[in-house]
Amino acid sequence: MTSAEPDPAHLRERVQGRLTGFLTDRGRAVAELGPELAAPMTVLADLTVGGKLLRPAFCYWGYRAAGAPDGEEIVTAAAALELLHVSALIHDDVMDDSDRRRGRPSAHRQFTELHRSAGWAGSAEGFGHGAAILLGDLVLGWADELLRSCGLPAERVAAAMAVFEAMRTEVMGGQYLDLVAQAAGDDDALARAMRVLRFKTAKYSVERPLQLGATLAGGSFALVQAFTAVGIPLGEAFQLRDDVLGVFGDPERTGKPAGDDLREGKRTVLVTTALATADTADRATMDALLGNPHLDANGVARLRSILVASGALDEVEKLIERLAAEAEDALAAAPIEDPTARQVLADLVVAATQRHE
């Protein structure tokens, strides 16, 4: 969540506090292995600050929507989703060779600099990538541990673990689909981009967190199913908005350099729509510039102009509006017991999809 998003339960501070406490405890444990482990814990501490915390928010309010009361147990469970997300971000940045995350150097860049500044032997980049992969794996395991130890009834945690496991499978499968989408470049690119969007983000970011919260509360099957009707269109709209911000957004707000998705050659819905609608000359320009890791500001500006001129940006904005409206309608029909939860979820629909102009 950003400071502008609804947070009547002060969830941001509570989730951050729980993460800090958990990582402090785990830091003491890994310190027994040797002083070298202090560096990964410092990198991790940096990466767990400054996120949107949307997944913990959807988990918490999914729990409250089922009529369950506030408590530190659900805050702990929600914090586990942020650890899962941090793990995915660390690995994603390695795959994309991204320089920055959340306004700071990405994990593998920090490890690369550690190697260089220490004057160690071997490849600094290889060390950075290897260390980041290990850190991401470690955090993935800790996310599981934090959820299992949240303190809610064992039978509910066991049921929620099935949701959590599906969530992990879907996001990792979605990541692979994303890699294929960048490499394949076939005529089915738009459909492929939408499939990546659904599994890498929509289900992982909104649907599954809502369902996990409802399951932890012992919510009804009808509510869990309703959260699919809410979560899929909202998650898709959220990712489409994120794709637009990745090209046109302010780096001060996004925490990443503008145009990184273009440098990485990401076949987002925005990009694949432009490739399908641009004229021959503009498409040739896109083919020449997309995926160039050294793309400068002029190249980014040229691609932006094509995304606008082709009508792709306008089409994506219309799609975001349609999906957000679908999510709002589904939310209005959902059997939510708590009126505060209903209002906060309605506000989160707006917060997750609104323009940042």
Image: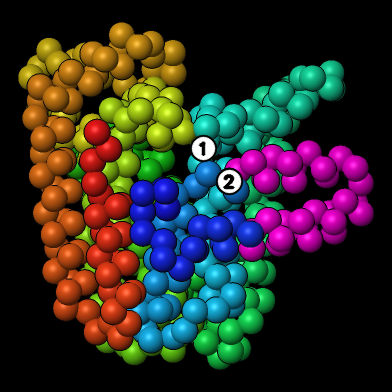
Against 248, residue 237 (above or below) is below
Q: Do the residues labelled 1 and 2 touch (CB within 8 Å)?
A: yes
Compare residues 112 and 289 and report the one nearer the observer. Answer: 112
Asked if the stretch drawn in magenta spans residue 25, the answer is yes
Pinpoint residue 86: horizontal percent, then vertical percent. Answer: 56, 50
Against 186, residue 21 (above or below) is below
Pinpoint residue 347: horizontal percent, then vertical percent. Answer: 27, 61
Q: Residue at x 38, y 14 (%)?
A: 295
User: Which residue is identified by label 2?
Assistant: 49
Compare residues 330 and 173 and report the one nearer the observer. Answer: 330
Q: Is residue 224 left or right of residue 135?
A: left
Q: How far, Cα to Cα, is label 1 from label 2?
A: 8 Å
Q: Which residue is drawn at 67% across and 69% down?
A: 145
Q: For residue 140, say whether it is visible.
A: no
Pinpoint residue 240: horizontal percent, then vertical percent. Answer: 26, 44
Residue 328 is labelled as none
Against 324, residue 180 (above or below) is above
Pinpoint residue 99: horizontal percent, then vertical percent. Answer: 54, 26
Residue type highlighted by circle 1: Arg
Residue type highlighted by circle 2: Val
Q: What stretch is highlighted in magenta?
A: 18-47
Compare residues 88 and 80 and report the one nearer the observer. Answer: 80
Compare residues 340 and 190 and report the one nearer the observer. Answer: 340
Asked if the stretch drawn in magenta spans residue 308, the answer is no
* Label located before the other in sequence (1 or 2): 2
Q: Residue at x 83, y 44 (%)?
A: 37
Residue 102 is labelled as 1
Q: For residue 130, say whether it is visible.
A: yes
